[in-house]
Image (cartoon, rainbow, N blue to C red):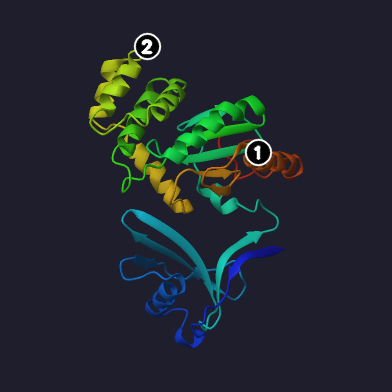
Amino acid sequence: MRLLLCIGFTTALAFAQLKSAKDKTTFEAYVRQTLAWGPQINVEVSDAKPAPLTGFVEYDVKGSANNVTQEEVFYVSPDGQKIVRGTVFDGKANPFKQNLDKIKADFTSANLGTPGAPVVIVMYSDFQCSFCRAEAKLLRENLIKTYPKEVRLYFKDFPLEQLHDWAKSAAIAGRCVFQQDSQKFWDYHDSIFDKQGEINLANLKSIVQAWAATKELDSLKLTTCIDQKATEKEVERSQEEGRSLGVNSTPTMYINGRKVSGSLQWEMLKQVIDSEIKYQKTAKNAGEDCGCTIALPSLVK
């Protein structure tokens, strides 16, 4: 059984203008009109592939401008006269399986909480983002204290380079810290967010070095890692993963695959987590120990 949700049907634009499901040029024009994407937006339309809706084909569409991307999925009838925009859910699987399949949450990412927890939160964040700072403080103060065994948190870098000039450099430095001592990353995380208002591109390195000097880290090794941008590819992989999920702002969380954008008050976030804990008692189709192909890998194998 398949459930179809979040469906956007036609706009006032007549379907007759879409001559064929195979006419990608015409389809691109239709997408631009529907989403109000002007000429400044670069639009990529995939080749048609089988859709989860019987009798339809699927087109994956990506719009991009200034390092910001947005991905959309359209299902088109063979004659091009019927178009569905949205997500198709399989009633036999986790409703957010498509997101879970794209998330690489394992020992290569900074994490907190209990391996095997029924709820996994993956946070895409930016060290220069004030909203991320507030959400990070909320999570650090409440999450593990409230859910010592039920939740596992993974931190993912998603610096918004077009807006923040030192965010990527801070992410690179954080990954260098993580390589030396995975647990000290969280001290770094807290310190950079605490000092966010003092940091700029010119003084970031010296602030990181001063912090590292008090943490029994190999300062020379850390400085070399930062200067050589040895972890830049890791940060970029994290960014690319986020973009594949449709992340275009920070903070963005995925709670057992459910996308939650922006900052949430603790009580609202707690309601989502409590609901997921209850659901996973019977569903067992998410978290770190669901015993299925969509499991998020644990730090402990």
Q: Residue furthest right?
A: 282
Mark 1 against mark 2, which lies toward the viewer? 1
Q: Nearer the viewer, residue 98 or 8?
A: 8
Amino acid carrying label 1: it is Glu
Q: Is residue 107 left or right of residue 6?
A: left
Q: Position of residue 250 (x, y in %)?
A: 45, 45
For image coordinates 26% across by 17% down, the residue present is: 220
The amino acid marked with disc number 2 is: Glu
Q: Which residue bears the numbered disc 1? A: 267
Which of the numbered marks, if any, corresponds to residue 71? none
Dot 2: what SS?
Answer: loop
Q: Is residue 77 left or right of residue 41?
A: right
Name the foreground residue: 159 vs 281: 159
Marks 1/2: CA–CA distance: 37 Å
Image spot of residue 271 (x, y percent): 68, 41
Q: Is residue 293 above or below residue 47?
A: above
- Is 167 left, or right, of 243 in this rendering? left
Residue 268 placed where, x, y %?
64, 42
> Which residue is label 2 attached to?
216
- Figure quadrant of residue 88: bottom right
Q: Residue at x 54, y 50 (%)?
A: 99
Which quadrant of the figure contains the C terminus?
A: top right
**What residue is drawn where x is 31% and y is 49%?**
162
Name above or below for residue 61 compared with residue 100. below
Assign the N terminus to one quadrant of the image. bottom right
